[in-house]
Amino acid sequence: MSLFFRYIGILYLKYFFILFVSLECFFVVIDLVKYLDELPDSANLIVLLLIYDFMYASQFILPLSLILAQIVLTIVLLKNSQWTAFLALGYSKFKIFLPIFILSFLITLFFIILNATPFAYAKERVDLIINEGFLGNFKNDLFVKYNNTYIYFEKIFPLLQSAEGVYVFELNQDNSSILSIVESQKAIFNGEEWELQNVMITNFNDDNLQIGQNPLIIQKRETYVTLYGFKPKILENIYEKKGSISIMDAYEAISLLKEQGVNTQKIRGLLYNLIFFPLFAPLVMVCLVNFTPNSNRYVNLSLITLSMILGILVMWGVFFSFSRLSISGFLQPEISILIPIFILFLVSFWTLIKMQKA
């Protein structure tokens, strides 16, 4: 690692951490004021609330901090005439910005990896502390289709990997009539499938529909297995209008829903948003090079800075709006997320080629 790389890299990281921590604290304080009347009495829960809110805010703050740090660094170098000095020494714009590109890409990659972990559920933890006052949450009234069966959960506990009040309705091949109803007050997810305990099965005998004859056959079993591969977190998030999900759970959910012939638009939107939306920052940072002057002598730095910041905020708002529309189901995620990111990639790639030739 050259001395120049370390110099530019350390300066960039300094401005990035200052902006990131400042914006994060501002976001958390605003949220704290919003939840002021709903804060729990426990000091431990308040600390956890601040930590989870800090983690949740990073989804919005991190890309903006990466871009704003580059703008601040560029303006500082221009004001101190260091930018012009580097160009006079033979450094091209590509070589000057290369440490920034590499660091921003590595930070973004690390953030994407974090989205494959429980880090992605930070917003859910915040809502739990505010609404429930504890972290042992449960969800009510979930209805799931699985092959020729429909499963109803009165309560599901994602953190405990269990559920209560489970009813399984088994239908015939053409889904025209119910063959049996399976009832259980307790179900456990064993890592691969749901195991219902102390089960009562009611079978319907269509061949015995005669006056004076009982068409119901009731039997009891200790266990009953269903819903192979449906993790509690997948069940919790698929059927919510708003929800959080990690990359791994989203990938598994798409695979399972495709097998069941269920629409995967919302989950695809969540998955694309977790993987591709963070790339907005490093791609835009490459494009910003075109707006960087060679000297501060003949330009208005204040106007350039303001234009860059406003342009970035507007562009980020457009991309963020598209991602929200895809998650809500209004737009196809391939159109609202993948295509804009791909266009931005082409523009940044063209800018990169142009810098290397200059």
Image: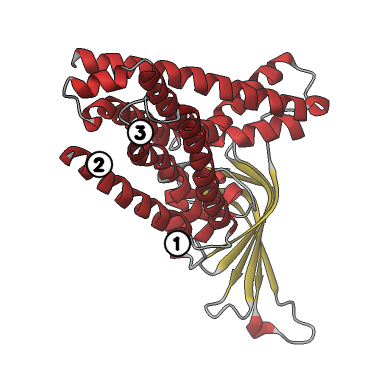
Q: Residue 335, which numbered label? A: 1
**Where is residue 344 shown, x and y percent of the image?**
37, 50
Residue at disc 3, secondary structure: loop
Binning the other alpha carbons within 10 Å of mark 3 as few (below 14), some (14 to 19) or many (20 upward) gives some
What residue appears at the point 35 percent right and 53 percent down from the top-left corner? 342
Q: Amino acid at mark 3?
A: Thr
Residue at disc 2, secondary structure: helix
Q: Which of 120/312 is in front?
A: 312
Q: Is residue 353 left or right of residue 21?
A: left
What residue appears at the point 49 percent right and 42 percent down from the top-left corner? 311
For mark 2, what is the residue? 352
Q: Which of 118/26 is in front?
A: 26
- Quarter in which the N terminus is drawn: top left
Q: Amino acid at mark 2?
A: Leu
For mark 3, what is the residue? 292
**Where is residue 25 shown, x and y percent of the image?**
61, 21
Residue at disc 1, secondary structure: helix
